[in-house]
Image (spheres, helix red, strand yellow):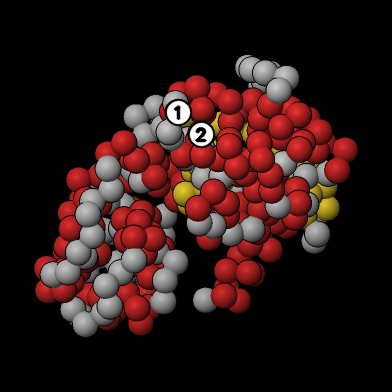
Amino acid sequence: MDRAQLADFLRRRRQALQPEDVGLGRSARRRAEGLRREEVAALCDMSVDYYSRLEQARGPQPSVQMLAAMARGLRLTLDERDHLFRLAGHTAPARRMRSQHVTPGLMRVLDRLADTPAQVMGEMGETLVQTGPARALFGDETRFRGPMRSIAYRWFMDPSSRDVYPEEDHAATSRLFVADTRAALAKLGPGSPAAEIVDAMLSGSPEFARLWAVHEVGARPPQDKRLQHPEVGVMTLQCQVLSDLEQNQTLLVLTAEPGSEDADKLQLLSMVGHRAATAGS
């Protein structure tokens, strides 16, 4: 780990970012060059003290997970992300795993959806980054490690993951997750993380094994998705999925018809997410 060079790189990247680059407002009295440390820390989901010590060349060696969070928070390109890993004393992730890095362009799109449930997903259904309303609705899905990062794995192996869906929709959702998993396995092939997850679910979930044996392919999710939240209730939302083919990622965005009861509930969900974020800061 090269602490001095890591600190210099972080400072330069922070000072190069402007509030508008990350969806923040600019006050008339703002004099800081680039972003403030506390702003970057919030973007990276880490404490201000931890980030400050890294910039002052006196922090501990960041973990791979911390580095990935900083790469997203600082809106680094893929080459800049690899440089960050090397400065921190880690081997840069293999480029075949590029789907784990969210590009600056996609992060800028997400910045403009701050009041909307939206999240970027990897090719095995891993949640890479979420807006506040998405976190309020689904919980912090970026905290998971190992196979639990996959939404399909959680669906079949952790019953609590189904709470956000009304019970009468569970059967159809199970079929969709199996079809999505089969498509991912066909793309990634034997020996991939997809194959390992499939093997684990076949041995650990009778429901998954039964649906897998049906060989259903090409199932398409409905555009209207029913989701529920303990403070907001059941909402019928339109689900739009935008694909980043180069990164093998999808941006999932949930919206409601303007003026509808669901739109009011979605606005309330945004307030719940903001309140939770403020309480945790």
Considering depth in this image, is 184 or 32 the residue closer to the camera? 184
Seen at 68% across and 44% down, the residue is 204
**Which amino acid type is marked by label 1?**
Pro
Q: Can residue 89 be seen in this view?
A: yes
Relative to 84, 236 lies left or right: right
Which picture quadrant has residue 90? bottom left
Residue 62 lies in quadrant: bottom left
In this picture, is 103 found above or below 76?
above
From this viewpoint, is residue 39 visible? no
In this rendered view, identify the residue nearer to me: 176 or 117: 176
Residue 219 placed where, x, y %?
Answer: 67, 20
Residue 251, position as x, y percentages in the image: 50, 38
Q: Is residue 102 left or right of residue 150?
A: left
Q: What element carries label 2?
A: helix
Nearest the eye: 51 or 95: 95
Residue 243: image x %, image y %?
46, 29
Q: Report the residue marked by disc 1.
A: 190
The answer to whether residue 60 is left or right of residue 119 is left
In this rendering, is residue 15 above or below 171?
below
Marks 2 and 1 close (CB-CB < 8 Å): yes
What is the number of the mark on residue 248?
none
Residue extending furthest front?
203
| CA distance for labels 2 and 1 | 6 Å
Q: Position of residue 183 (x, y in %)?
A: 55, 24
Which sits earlier in the primary sequence, circle 2 or circle 1? Answer: 1
Q: Mark 2 points at which residue?
A: 195
> Label 2 amino acid?
Ala
Task: Mark 2: give few (<14), some (14-19) or many (20+) Cα within 10 Å.
Answer: some
What residue is drawn where x is 28% and y is 48%? 93
